[in-house]
C-alpha cells in the first residue's frame, strides 16, 4: 500500500563499519526484528511478486480442483514426471503448502501494516493542521500575490472561509505574518485502510464460508428423479465442515431437456442457441413446483442453486445373454466428443453367461460417413441416429472389488469379438433394432424411447433420451465475499483518486505598505494536480477579495 | 442482411487499417525528423507565479512565458488520420454488432476488433489531458498488429451467441477488461519511453528524439496515472468476472487458467503500485513491473486463450 509521505518505511541502512561488534539480540529482539522485516514495504512487495510467480504453474499443469480429468490424463501421458510433480503439489497449487505460505505471510504482513497505520490515522484524524512553515517558497506550487491595500486579517479570514468551503480543515496561526494552515483528503488514507482491511475480509470469508459450502453433480436423464441425499449425487465435493444434515430435503425430476439449434445461418448450422432444462421440485411442506434452468440462469432451490453444466444423449440399451436372460438393461449417458454430439459410452454386463460382455459404443445423432470411411455426426439433433458397438468378452475386472469408472472400459483381460481388428464388423443399430452378438454371446437392443403409438412423420425426434448434468451448489460465503470485494473497490477508488494535501496561505507585510499573499502546498502521497490546485486557490481568493472590495 | 452488414464491417476494418498505416508511417517520419533535429526544447510547465497586482484588483499573469509548443507537422497530420481511422474503426465495430444482434466481443476476432478500437479511443481521449502523441507509432502499431492478426487468423463469420455467453455480464465484464487493457497498454508504452529517457539522462548513448520528450520523472508520473486507472478497471473486471462465474458455473472462483492469469496480472500491478512507495523501487524497477504486467495481459489475451485448456476456451476458433 502506498504510504503517506510522512511515513518512515525503515531507516536508511547505516554504512557497514567493520570491526565493530553488534550488540546481540535477545529472543524478543529477534521476534521484533523479524516482525519489522515482515511488515516492511519491501517484504510486502517481494511477497506480492512471489505470489504472482507462484500462481503461474497452476495454469501450466492441470489442477485437481478445476480439471480432475486433466490430471488423470497427465498421469497417463507422463507416467514418470507426474509423480514427481505430485510430490511438490503441482496438481494442487492453490492449496499447496508453498502457495498457502506465501499468501498467509502476505496477509500477516498486511495485518502488521494495517494495524499501526490505522492507529496512526486515527490520531491524525484528531490532529489539527500543523503550524505554517516559516518559508513557503520551497514548497510545491508556491505563488505570491502582491496587494498594497488589503488588510492582512481580512485576507486570511477570507482564505480560511474559502478553504473550509473546499473541504479543508483549517487552523489560523499568527507567527511572523498571519497565516492559515489547511489540510484535506483524510479520506485517502481511510480508503487505503478500508481497501486492505476488505482484502483480509475477502480471505476470511472465503476461508470460513467455503468450509461450509458444498457442490455436487448429478447426471440426470429425462424422466429420472433425483433426491437430495449424498448417495444420489454422481460426484460430490464437500467443504471442510460439511455435514450431511446440511442437504435440504427435496426431490427433483428432469421433466424435459430441450435444445434449440441454428438452422438458418449456414455459417453456424447446428450451432446451439439455447439449452433449457425443465424440472419439477418436490419439497416437503411446499408441494411440487416447476422451474427451468438455463446456462446462465440457475434455479434457486431452498437456499442452494441448481446449475446446468452439460448435456448429451442417453440411449437405452438391453443386452440378453447367450442363455436368453436379460444381462443388462439401462439408460446409458454417452459423453459428447464433438460439437455435433458424436458421443461415447460404455456398457458392462458382468452377469452375462457364458461370458461377461463389455461394449464401447459410439452414438451419432445424425450419422454421416467421412471420406476415410469413419463414421461421424453431421448435426447435433436426432435426424438419423446410429449406435455402433465394439464388443468385448472376457473379464471386466469388476469382481475383485477395485472401483471402476462407468466412463471407461478396461479391455486388458478381454477379447474383442466385434469391431476394430476382430473378424466381425462393429454392431450397428438404429433406435428399436436388435442385433445378434457374435459367438453366441446373445443379443443387444437399442431401445426406442418413443411411445409405441407415435407418428412416423416426426422422424427420429425423441427416439433417444437426453441427459443433463446438473450442479447443485450451496455456498454461504458468496454474499460476504462480494460485499468485501465491493468495499475493497470503494476503498481503492478513494485511496487512489482523493488527493491528500496541505495548503498554506500567509500574509506577509511588505516594505512600503500593503501585504504579500503567499500560497503553497504539500502533497501527501500521489498528487499530480497540486500545482494547479494552488494556482486555482490563489485565483479564487483574489476574486473573492475583489468582490469584497466592490461591495 | 446480416452478411451484407458483416461485409461492410470488414470493409471498414480494412479502410481503418489503411488509414492507421499511413498515420503510423507519418508518426515514424516525425520521430525520425526529431532525432535529426537537435533543438533542446525543454518542455516544462511554468511554476505558476502570479504577479503585478494593483490593489486587490488582481490580474493574474504567469511570469514565465510558456515556450511556444513546437509544431510537429507530420505528427499533427498523423493524429488527424488516427482520429479519422478510429471513426471508421468504431463504425466497423458497430456494424459487426448490428449484424449479429449482440455485443461484438464474443470471440477472438471480435475481441481483437473491439479492444484495438478501445486502445485507440483511449489514446485519442488522453490527448485532451496530456500530449502523448509521441506514443502514436506505438499505438497505431499495436492497433495494426491486433487488427491484422485478428482479421487474418481469427476471422469467423457472424454466428449466434452461444448459450454460455448469453448474459449481460458479457457486456460488462469483457468491455471493462478491454478498457483496462487499453490503459495498461498506454501505461506500458509510457514506461518504455521512461526507461529510454532514464538511460539518456544517465548519460548513455540514446536516441536524439528523446530530447524532445518529457523527462523520466514526468514520464513515470504519467505512466503511473494511466496505469492506476487501468488497475481500477482490472479490479472491476476481476469482480465482474467472479459474479458471472458464480451465475454461470456455480462458483465465483475456481482457478481456471484465465482466472489464474487475471489474478497474476492483478497482483503484478498491485506490486507496481507498492513499488512506487518502496525505497529503491521507484523509477526503472517499477517501470519494468508495468511492462511485465502488460506482457502478462498480452499473454493472457493470446497464449492463454489459444493454447491453454480452460473454461474460457469458447473463443470461437
Image (cartoon, coloured by chain):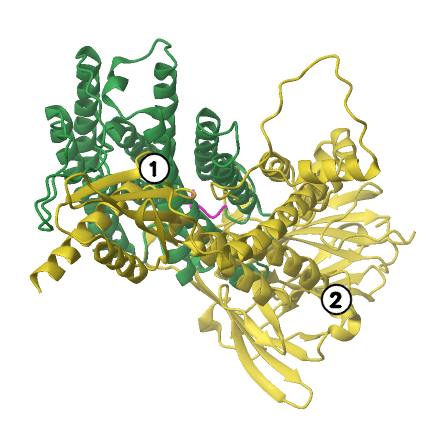
Provide residue B275's location: percent of width, then percent of height: 50, 34
Mark 1 neighbour class, 10 Å CA radius: few under 14, some 14 to 19, many 20 or more? few
Compared across the picture, whether A320 is left or right of A60 comes to: right
* Quadrant location, the N terminus of chain B: bottom left
For label 2, the residue is: A329
For label 1, the residue is: A135
Q: Residue furthest front?
A: A512
Residue appearing at x 37%, y 48% in the figure: A502
Compared across the picture, whether A241 is left or right of B14 comes to: right
Query: Where is residue A244, by image quadrant?
Result: bottom right
Chain assigned yellow: A
Q: Is residue A473 visible?
A: yes
Residue appearing at x 77%, y 64% in the figure: A241
The magenta stretch spans which residues? Answer: B313-317
Q: Residue furthest top?
A: B205
**For residue A466, above or below residue B218:** below
Q: Is residue A270 visible?
A: no
Compared across the picture, whether A480 is left or right of A521 comes to: right
Pick the front one: A225 or A488: A488
Residue appearing at x 44%, y 55% in the figure: A186
Pick the front one: B189 or A23: A23
Q: Considering the numbered disc 1 on the image, is that residue within a helix, a strand or a loop?
A: loop
Chain of the residue under the numbered disc 2 shown in the image: A
Chain assigned green: B
Q: Main secondary structure of the magenta part?
A: loop
Provide residue A450's location: percent of width, then percent of height: 57, 73
Amino acid at each position: 500500500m502506498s504510504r503517506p509521505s510522512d511515513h518512515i518505511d525503515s531507516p536508511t541502512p547505516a554504512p557497514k563499519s567493520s570491526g565493530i561488534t553488534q550488540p546481540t539480540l535477545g529472543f524478543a529482539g529477534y521476534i521484533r526484528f523479524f516482525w519489522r522485516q515482515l511488515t516492511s514495504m519491501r517484504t510486502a512487495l517481494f511477497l506480492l511478486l512471489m505470489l504472482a510467480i507462484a500462481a503461474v504453474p497452476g495454469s501450466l499443469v492441470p489442477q485437481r480442483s478445476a480439471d480432475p480429468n486433466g490430471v488423470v490424463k497427465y498421469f497417463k501421458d507422463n507416467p514418470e514426471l507426474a509423480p514427481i510433480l505430485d510430490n511438490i503439489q503441482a496438481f494442487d497449487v492453490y492449496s499447496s503448502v508453498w502457495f498457502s505460505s506465501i499468501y498467509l505471510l502476505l496477509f500477516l504482513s498486511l495485518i502488521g501494516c494495517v494495524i499501526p497505520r490505522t492507529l496512526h490515522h486515527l490520531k491524525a484524524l484528531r490532529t489539527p493542521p500543523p503550524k505554517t512553515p516559516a518559508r513557503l517558497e520551497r514548497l510545491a506550487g508556491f505563488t505570491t500575490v502582491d496587494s498594497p491595500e488589503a488588510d492582512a486579517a481580512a485576507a486570511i479570514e477570507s482564505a480560511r472561509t474559502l478553504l473550509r468551503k473546499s473541504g479543508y480543515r483549517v487552523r489560523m496561526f499568527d507567527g511572523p505574518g498571519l497565516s492559515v494552515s489547511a489540510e484535506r483528503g483524510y479520506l485517502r488514507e481511510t480508503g487505503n485502510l478500508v481497501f486492505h482491511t476488505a482484502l483480509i475480509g475477502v480471505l476470511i470469508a472465503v476461508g470460513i464460508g467455503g468450509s461450509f459450502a458444498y457442490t455436487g453433480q448429478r447426471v440426470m436423464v429425462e424422466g429420472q428423479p433425483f433426491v437430495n441425499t449424498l448417495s444420489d449425487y454422481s460426484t460430490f465435493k464437500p467443504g471442510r465442515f460439511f455435514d450431511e444434515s446440511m442437504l435440504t430435503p427435496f426431490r427433483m425430476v428432469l421433466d424435459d431437456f430441450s435444445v434449440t439449434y441454428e438452422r438458418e445461418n449456414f455459417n453456424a448450422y447446428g450451432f446451439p442457441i439455447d439449452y433449457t432444462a425443465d424440472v419439477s421440485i418436490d419439497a416437503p411442506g411446499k408441494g411440487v413446483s416447476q422451474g427451468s434452468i438455463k446456462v446462465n440462469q440457475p434455479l434457486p432451490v431452498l437456499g442452494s442453486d441448481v446449475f446446468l453444466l452439460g448435456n448429451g444423449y442417453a440411449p437405452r440399451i438391453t443386452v440378453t445373454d447367450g442363455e436368453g436372460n436379460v444381462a443388462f438393461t439401462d439408460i446409458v449417458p454417452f459423453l459428447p466428443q464433438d460439437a455435433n454430439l458424436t458421443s461415447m459410452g460404455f456398457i458392462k454386463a458382468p452377469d452375462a453367461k457364458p461370458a461377461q460382455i463389455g461394449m464401447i459404443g459410439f452414438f451419432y445423432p445424425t450419422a454421416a460417413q467421412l471420406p476415410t470411411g469413419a463414421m461421424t455426426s453431421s448435426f447435433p439433433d436426432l435426424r438419423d441416429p446410429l449406435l455402433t458397438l465394439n464388443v468385448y468378452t472376457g473379464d471386466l475386472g469388476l469382481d475383485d472389488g477395485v472401483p471402476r469408472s462407468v466412463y471407461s472400459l478396461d479391455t486388458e483381460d478381454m477379447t474383442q469379438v466385434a469391431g476394430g481388428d476382430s473378424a466381425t464388423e462393429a454392431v450397428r443399430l438404429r433406435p428399436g433394432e436388435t442385433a445378434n452378438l457374435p459367438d453366441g454371446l446373445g443379443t443387444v437392443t437399442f431401445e426406442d424411447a418413443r411411445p409405441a403409438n407415435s407418428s412416423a412423420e416426426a422422424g427420429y425426434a425423441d427416439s433417444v433420451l437426453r441427459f443433463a448434468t446438473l450442479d447443485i451448489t450451496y455456498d454461504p460465503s458468496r454474499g460476504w465475499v462480494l460485499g468485501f470485494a465491493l468495499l475493497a473497490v470503494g476503498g481503492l477508488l478513494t485511496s487512489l483518486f482523493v488527493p491528500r494535501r496541505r495548503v498554506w496561505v500567509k500574509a506577509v507585510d511588505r516594505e512600503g505598505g500593503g501585504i504579500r499573499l503567499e500560497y503553497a502546498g504539500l502533497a501527501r502521497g500521489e498528487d499530480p494536480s497540486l500545482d494547479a490546485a494552488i494556482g486555482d486557490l490563489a485565483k479564487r481568493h483574489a476574486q473573492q477579495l475583489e468582490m469584497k472590495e466592490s461591495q | 442482411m446480416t452478411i451484407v452488414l458483416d461485409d461492410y464491417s470488414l470493409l471498414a476494418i480494412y479502410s481503418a487499417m489503411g488509414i492507421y498505416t499511413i498515420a503510423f508511417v507519418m508518426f515514424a517520419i516525425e520521430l525520425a525528423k526529431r532525432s535529426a533535429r537537435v533543438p533542446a526544447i525543454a518542455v516544462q510547465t511554468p511554476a505558476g507565479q502570479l504577479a503585478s497586482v494593483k490593489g486587490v484588483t488582481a490580474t493574474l499573469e504567469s511570469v514565465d512565458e510558456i515556450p511556444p509548443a513546437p509544431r510537429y507537422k507530420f505528427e499533427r497530420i498523423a493524429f488527424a488520420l488516427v482520429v479519422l481511422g478510429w471513426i471508421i474503426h468504431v463504425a466497423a465495430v458497430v456494424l459487426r454488432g448490428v449484424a449479429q444482434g449482440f455485443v461484438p466481443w464474443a470471440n477472438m476476432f471480435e475481441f481483437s476488433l473491439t479492444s484495438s478500437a478501445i486502445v485507440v479511443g483511449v489514446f485519442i481521449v488522453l490527448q485532451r489531458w496530456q500530449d502523448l502523441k509521441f506514443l502514436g507509432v506505438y499505438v497505431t502499431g499495436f492497433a495494426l498488429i491486433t487488427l491484422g492478426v485478428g482479421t487474418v487468423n481469427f476471422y469467423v463469420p457472424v454466428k449466434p451467441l452461444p448459450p454460455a455467453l448469453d448474459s449481460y455480464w458479457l457486456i460488462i465484464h469483457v468491455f471493462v477488461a478491454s478498457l483496462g487493457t487499453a490503459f495498461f497498454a498506454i501505461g506500458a508504452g509510457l514506461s518504455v519511453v521512461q526507461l529510454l529517457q532514464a538511460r539518456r539522462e544517465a548519460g548513455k548513448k540514446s536516441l536524439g528524439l528523446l530530447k524532445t520528450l518529457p523527462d523520466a520523472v514526468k514520464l513515470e508520473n504519467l505512466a503511473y496515472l494511466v496505469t492506476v486507472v487501468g488497475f481500477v478497471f482490472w479490479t472491476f473486471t476481476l469482480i465482474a468476472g467472479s459474479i458471472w462465474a458464480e451465475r454461470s458455473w456455480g462458483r465465483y472462483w475456481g482457478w481456471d487458467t484465465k482466472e489464474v492469469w487475471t489474478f497474476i496480472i492483478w497482483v503484478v500491478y498491485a506490486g507496481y503500485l507498492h513499488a512506487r512507495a518502496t525505497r529503491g523501487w521507484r523509477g526503472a524497477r517499477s517501470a519494468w513491473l508495468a511492462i511485465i504486467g502488460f506482457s502478462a495481459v498480452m499473454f493472457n489475451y493470446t497464449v492463454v486463450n489459444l493454447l491453454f485448456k480452460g473454461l474460457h476456451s469458447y473463443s470461437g476458433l
